[in-house]
Image: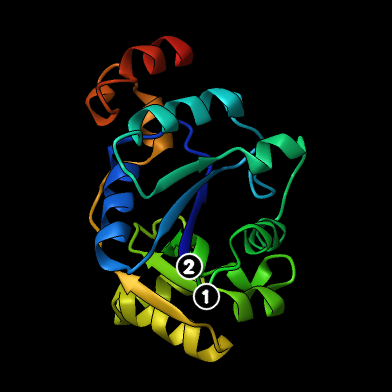
Amino acid sequence: MKIAIFGGSFDPPHKGHLQIMELVLNKLDIDRLIILVAYKNPFKKNYRIEARKRLEWLESITSKYDKIICSDYEILQDKVITSIQSIRYFESIYKPSKLYFVLGQDNFLQVDKWNEFNTLKTKVEFIVIQRDLENMQDYKKELMQSKTSKEVCMQYASELDIKMQFLSFCYNNSSSKIIQDISNNINEIPSNIYKDVLESYK
């Protein structure tokens, strides 16, 4: 079995997340795409909406996709869970012949700081989704002046001996930007959850 894991806060889930899921399903030969809702991200202070509600929204917007499973594994642990812990859990469940880990290029370019990085990179192939790098560290910004997003990620992967695929993607919003002006950005939220999202963030 071949699986891909796409984790995140999904605070809230938006149309860009769905587009990434569809891109992954179209580009990768996989049997399952596991959407992993973070209980708490070690790189973020807190979330606006509790994890169970975020999971409920994701289950609602992905129900039509046969290959997608929304997982509450990290939520059930009731504490911060690192990516390597989650990967080991899903390895034990599925015994995959191939395991992909989907993430944005902003997160990918700091993956060497993740817990047990040297073990992590032997277990997965990273699927890197193109993203706006405006918040990256200065030295990454300098690289971007002379190289494309793909070239920067490929150079980083080569230097650290990381298996990766880069997927071009264009979506100009993020959960944080949407929430800053939720009323005017409500069209970025899938229609079957937007009323609940609007009420929750108010």
Could you tell me residue 22's position as x and y percent?
A: 27, 52
Could you tell me residue 43's position as x and y percent?
A: 65, 50
Image quadrant where one finds the C terminus: top left
Q: Quadrant of residue 153?
A: bottom left
**Does label 1 or label 2 sit earlier along the sequence?**
2
Relative to the observer, which residue lies in front, 103 or 177? 103
Q: Is residue 53 left or right of residue 145?
A: right
Relative to the observer, which residue lies in front, 97 or 138? 97
Identify residue for label 2: 1
Q: Quadrant of residue 17?
A: top left
User: What mark, if any, has residue 172 been given in the picture?
Assistant: none
Mark 2 Cα-neighbour bin, 10 Å: few <14, some 14–19, many ≥20: few
Residue at 43%, 54% (x, y): give it: 33
Residue 137 in view here = no
Residue 23 in view here = yes
Q: How far apart are the alpha carbons under marks 1 and 2?
A: 6 Å
- Callout 1 amino acid: Ser
Q: Is residue 25 left or right of residue 99?
A: left
Identify residue for label 1: 97
Could you tell me residue 152's position as x and y percent?
A: 39, 79
Q: Are marks 1 and 2 in contact (CB under 8 Å)?
A: yes
Could you tell me residue 140's position as x and y percent?
A: 46, 72
Q: In the structure shown, which secondary structural element does the residue marked by tag 1 occupy?
A: loop
- Callout 2 amino acid: Met
